[in-house]
Image: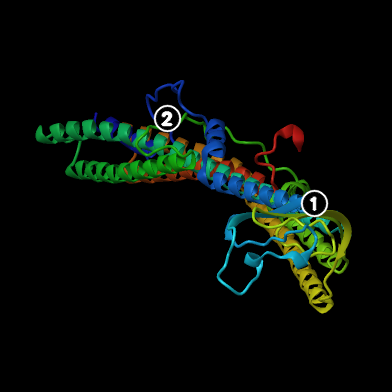
Amino acid sequence: MARTLLVLVFATIGTAWTPAAPALGQTATSSEALTLPQLVQLALKQNRLIKIDEARVKEAEALVGFAAAQAYPQFGGRLLFGGPVSEAKTTVINDVSTLTDASYEGDFNFGDLGVTLRMQATGFVPIFTFGKLSTARAAAEAVVRAAEENVHVTEGVVAVNVHRAYWAYQLTDKFLGSLSDGDKILADVIKKVEDLLAAESDQVTENDRLRLLHARATLQVRRHEAKDARDIALTALKLLVSRPMGQPLDVASGDIEELPPAAPPIAQVIDDAVRFRPELRALSRVVDAQEQFVSFRRRALFPDLFIGAFLETAITTNATDHTNPFVYDRFNFFEAGVALGIQFQLDVFNKVAQIDQAQAELETRIAQTAAAAEGVELEVRKIHIEVTGNYEKMEPALKAYKAGRSWLTAAALAYDIGTGDAGELIDAFLASATAEADLRRTQYEIQLGRVDLSRASGTLLIPQGQK
């Protein structure tokens, strides 16, 4: 009887020490539980890091609006109203020799005090700038495209983190369930062994009881570790989807044994990375913006053609309104006009220096893009090797797992009928537990490796039909 119980204990421990073993009596998934795709979509919609990058896109769009506004008519004006104004009259219009006594300057006779209204307005409309406005706007639009690609970069990182937290939660949750079930079984077995020892039965020994106590204590330590790991994974998921810590987050169960398809050929993955990797696309947009900026600097050597307009008027209540155009009248007048103009600045040496600086910055951006492309290819090749290697390890890992379970079963039967010993049973248990742990770890690494490879190739969030 004791040997049969010990077999059950070791089999239970072998399952409990396996990180991905399914929990016994696991309840069905709640209708409100969030699946992995739902968690990813929720994170992409609510994650605060993505919100920051989206706000930066709006900043770049505002820059485009500013560049475009330079082609719009520009108006300015000034309006003054005040007083008192001393008298400025003549007794005869357009005859300045008939100045009234109070209109002379240099004394304190201000005469008839009044008020004055003055208005000045100007308008400016560029009609030809030799491409300055178009290149400035093109550069700003390229900055917007780069900002949008940066949003995709952050989305990819967030999606990968959701996958990592999700699968970590699945592993630790199932691990915790197995450990809890194993602890209950060990408690029952220990009680029965202690009853046999109390009855002075020769079927069990004190060493059997001590082995069981050690096994249960070890199991309880692992259970606490699993609970902490599961809580950390759940906390990470809440942060990623911007769920308040005080609110629950129900995560749907996932089958880690259901592996994604094998990695495509490395040539295809690299080609996808060149076309879809958002970091490379963002750098390409930065290069476009810098090229347009260099063109803008070159075009600054040319003048601007514009249409200008002005309007000036003054009305003073205690001043004679002279109508003779040869009489200067600063108190009452009205002038307006429209003209075609040209403006330019002759700081040629400064502009040439700015062109050289912009060209040097362009060469830097091009070099950075080339270096980034090499780095991306190295990353893709590294991940591809790891993923391919994990797929290749699956078959021997599965064989080792099956062999370990068979060894444990044979050792348990031998021990049960009295032909085996506890040492061999423990060795079989350790081998079985190690083999199953290796299998689950390989499956876990494949799940995350395929996600990493999709992110590295830029296709993680691209629908299959758009690739």
Which label sits on residue 250? 2
Left/right of residue 146 with respect to residue 157 in the rendered view: right
Task: State the CA–CA distance, disc 2 to disc 1.
Answer: 55 Å
Quickly name the residue at label 1.
Answer: 71
Residue at coordinates 82% horizontally, 71% vertically from top-left? 345
Q: Give, as a three-letter code, the residue at label 1.
A: Ala
Indicate the position of residue 220 as horizontal and vertical percent values: 27, 42
Instruction: Please tell me whether mark 2 or mark 1 is closer to you in this view.
Output: 1
Q: Give, as a three-letter code, the residue at label 2.
A: Asp
Dot 2 lies on which element? loop
Q: Residues within 10 Å of mark 1 (few under 14, many from 20)?
A: some
| Residue 60 visible in the displayed image | yes
> In which quadrant of the rendered view does residue 442 lie?
top right
By what rule are the colours in the image chosen?
rainbow
Farthest-out residue, bottom: 349
The disc, 2 or 1, on the residue closer to the chain's N-terminal end is 1
| Picture layout, residue 424 above or below residue 173 | below
Indicate the position of residue 18 as horizontal and vertical percent values: 42, 40
| Picture layout, residue 416 above or below residue 108 | above
Frontmost residue, 301 versus 229: 301
Which label sits on residue 360? none
Residue at coordinates 73% horizontally, 59% vertically from top-left? 91
| Picture layout, residue 243 above or below residue 147 | above
Left/right of residue 132 with respect to residue 247 in the rendered view: right
Frontmost residue, 179 versus 327: 327
Residue at coordinates 31% horizontally, 31% vertically from top-left? 181
Frontmost residue, 137 versus 183: 137
Task: Give yes or no for contact between labels 2 and 1 (Cβ–Cβ under 8 Å).
Answer: no
Frontmost residue, 81 versus 175: 81
The quadrant of the image that shows the N terminus is top left
Left/right of residue 196 with respect to residue 262 in the rendered view: left
